[in-house]
Image (cartoon, helix red, strand yellow):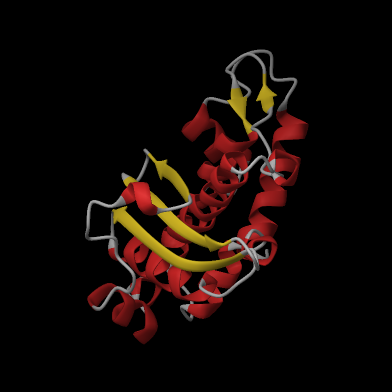
Amino acid sequence: MAAKWTYSDKVKDHFMNPRNILREGNEVDFHGIGKTGNVKCGDEMMVFIKVDPATQTIAECKWQTYGCASAIASTSMLSEMVIGMKLEEAYKISAKDILTALDGLPDNKVHCSVLGDKALRAAIDDYYRRNGMEDRITTQESKIVCECMQVTDHDIEHAVLEGARSFHELQEMTKIGTGCGECQEQAMAVMSGYIQKHFGL
């Protein structure tokens, strides 16, 4: 069990010496702001970007994170990764990319890196909206999987990131399928997809 909680040197470095934190109260100076959070673990992230309009690249990326060491390290690493990157390239950064750059995180902390890439996409979406580029927004809205309990695919994703690996565990976390039960097959498919996406299993 102790080995699963061992953090890499990169995670420790970015936690102890975080880069690009927004310390000033100058949020209005940024061209795009994204916010996301996971109420189950208490982490909340905000990403602030400045964009070079001529090249559509991220000139500056600042952030504020309220959460654990993994959340801080993930957002710090992300902020370094995207500076100088074109918006469409940054939009495609995944949790796996952040995990690889950090040399991994404990399984039960992977959700921290997922929050980082979602906050970044939200900031880019905000930039697109402000500049009349809504057609470039591709972030998907959540979809209802269980009509009875109003459980979405995003709820299932959060459950997977919190450790759900079986339908029984998914039910305990979300109450999915406790009504008519007709959603079980679809729920299992969605869960398997997220397990593959985030853990490669």
Could you say which quadrant of the image residue 105 lies in?
bottom left
Observer able to see residue 105: no
| Residue 151 locus on image (x, y percent) | 59, 25
| Residue 7 locus on image (x, y percent) | 35, 77
Horizontal placement of 25 versus 49: left or right? left
Observer able to see residue 159: yes
Horizontal placement of 189 versus 142: left or right? right
Horizontal placement of 139 versus 107: left or right? right
Give the vertical position of 182 relative to 153 (above or below). above
Specify the quadrant that holds the C terminus.
bottom right
| Residue 122 locus on image (x, y percent) | 54, 46
Foreground residue, 125 or 67?
Answer: 125
Give the vertical position of 149 relative to 90 (above or below). above
Furthest-front residue in view?
A: 54
Specify the quadrant that holds the N terminus.
bottom left
Foreground residue, 72 or 197?
Answer: 72
Instruction: Look at 41% across and 60% down and name the residue there.
Output: 109
Foreground residue, 115 or 22?
Answer: 22
Furthest-bottom residue in view?
A: 9
Foreground residue, 164 or 19?
Answer: 19
Instruction: Look at 69% across and 59% down and name the residue there.
Output: 196
Horizontal placement of 142 versus 100: left or right? right
Count of number-bearing discs: 0
Could you say which quadrant of the image residue 112 lies in?
bottom left
